[in-house]
Amino acid sequence: MPKSARPTRDGNGLVSHANIFMSIKPEHMANIASGAKNHEYRRYLLSSSISYIWFYTTVPISAIQYVAHISRGKAPGEVPEDGGLGNADFNAGKKQSKFGYEILALWKLEQPITLREAISRGFLKGPPQKYTFVSKQVCGEWELEKQTRVIGKDEAVKDTIKEGKGNYESAMTKGEKEPKKSIGENKITDFFSMKVE
């Protein structure tokens, strides 16, 4: 398992295998929310245990407004050319990104998490520079079943969000066991690779 995908602890309890914070520009977030962009493209392959991206929309929004349920990483040639923004260019190898993640479902948070709140409550140290894991506390406070679902291509995702468990427990549907308390006692390290405002 890559170092960045190893579950650990932060100031708010055990972090999830399945949920990450990731930065995105406002125009790209708007295109995903409208359905015009149905894949998010990145240069790196996410662990197969990651199922949810909590998008931090950069300035001037500076808040976490949306959460996406994503597919496994896809290589060029594996993305359907269905009119989604960037899909054809990705398959043709015209993008710098090497992996595409289909947006299977999307929720809009009823109460967005501002960067100020995320930092003051210890959810983030700053805007995610690559990605960082979401704590169990965040998954519990912002349960997806209580948010507004704006895209729902994958209806089966409902089965992974159980009442009282939230999306943190979705990692358990993949046969993963909650790590023992002795694992990953150190805080999340700063392993980010690109600067984001």
Image: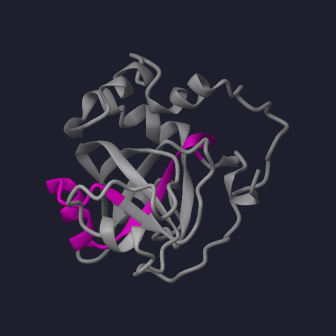
Q: Is residue 160 left or right of residue 65?
A: right
Asked if 16 appears above or below 176 in the picture, the reply is: below
Give 129 or 43, whichever is nearer the viewer: 43
Residue 61 seen from this side: no
The C terminus is located in which quarter? bottom left
Give 150 or 44, whichever is nearer the viewer: 44
Asked if 141 appears above or below 98 in the picture, the reply is: above
Q: Residue at 25%, 44% (x, y): give it.
A: 109
Residue stretch rendered in magenta on the structure: 12-39
Residue 71 location, x and y as percent? 45, 45
Residue 49 seen from this side: yes
Residue 84 location, x and y as percent? 23, 60
Asked if 175 appears above or below 186 in the picture, the reply is: above
Give the number of callouts.
0
Name the colour scheme: one colour
Q: Quadrant of residue 151?
A: top left
Q: Is residue 60 left or right of residue 95?
A: left
Residue 9 location, x and y as percent? 69, 46
Asked if 22 appears above or below 196 in the picture, the reply is: above
Q: Quadrant of residue 111?
A: top left
Q: In the current view of this chain or complex, which residue is farthest to the top?
A: 163
Residue 127 location, x and y as percent? 45, 70
Q: Residue at 70%, 45% (x, y): give it.
A: 7
- Residue 92 on the magenta segment: no
Q: Residue at 23%, 55% (x, y): give it.
A: 82
Q: Is residue 178 left or right of residue 152?
A: right
Q: Residue at 26%, 63% (x, y): give it.
A: 29
Give 173 or 122, whichever is nearer the viewer: 173
Q: In the current view of this chain or complex, which residue is farthest to the left?
A: 34
